[in-house]
Amino acid sequence: AGSGGNQEVARAIGCHDLALVRGGHVGDPRLAGVPFAVLIASRLPFATALPKLPVPWDEKTLSMTVRCRGHEIEVHSVHVPPGSTNKWTKVMVLEGIAKGLATPSPRRRVLCGDFNTPQHETISGEIITWAQRMTANKIVLRSRIHGGSGARWDAAERGIFAGGFVDVFRALH
């Protein structure tokens, strides 16, 4: 649970509950010891904390259930580290999120956060991952990226957009 100033801010914006996980940044040596947090603030009361998603840096995710009109809804908040500074940790975090949410749930789910992907999205909705190169005439999948498989990196980024999740922003706008 949150504390002090965080709780005051949450209440000021009408939130009933606040959950916070803190950690120190371990990927970029320039940010060593710099604290960060993943947060869920809710106008609905929390029901339970859920098990952590299986990612290499467990401070990158926070999962809770909230009660809404007699039903529980899973809320998963994540921060996927950028690949430019954290290389394959980004892919492992994306794969862990996908694996953790692959098991069907009797509850509705919300996945939110900072995914640091895709690289680009065309007007027609085509997703260009960081494993792809854009040229004037075409989009090409890199065979290798940061010393590993371009196909695996591409699949990890696309996996966030799969699994039955609807991008609410894009659906409404």
Image (cartoon, grey):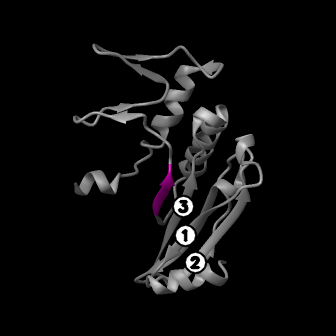
Residue visible at 48% across and 82% down?
Answer: 15
* Secondary structure under the numbered disc 2 in the rendered image: strand
Judge whether residue 112 is colored magenta.
yes
The residue tagged 3 is: 76
Q: Which residues are magenta?
A: 109-114
Q: Quadrant of the C terminus?
A: bottom left
What main secondary structure does the magenta stretch of the protein show?
A: strand
Q: Position of residue 51 (x, y in %)?
A: 68, 62
The residue tagged 2 is: 18
Residue visible at 40% across and 51% down?
Answer: 165
Q: Which labelled disc corresponds to residue 58?
A: none
Q: Mark 1: give few (<14), some (14-19) or many (20+) Cα within 10 Å.
A: many
Q: Position of residue 122 (x, y in %)?
A: 28, 33
Name the side, left or right, on which 148 lies relative to 104.
right
Residue furthest to the front in view is 30
Query: Which numbered disc, 2 or 3, marks the residue that appears first in the sequence?
Result: 2
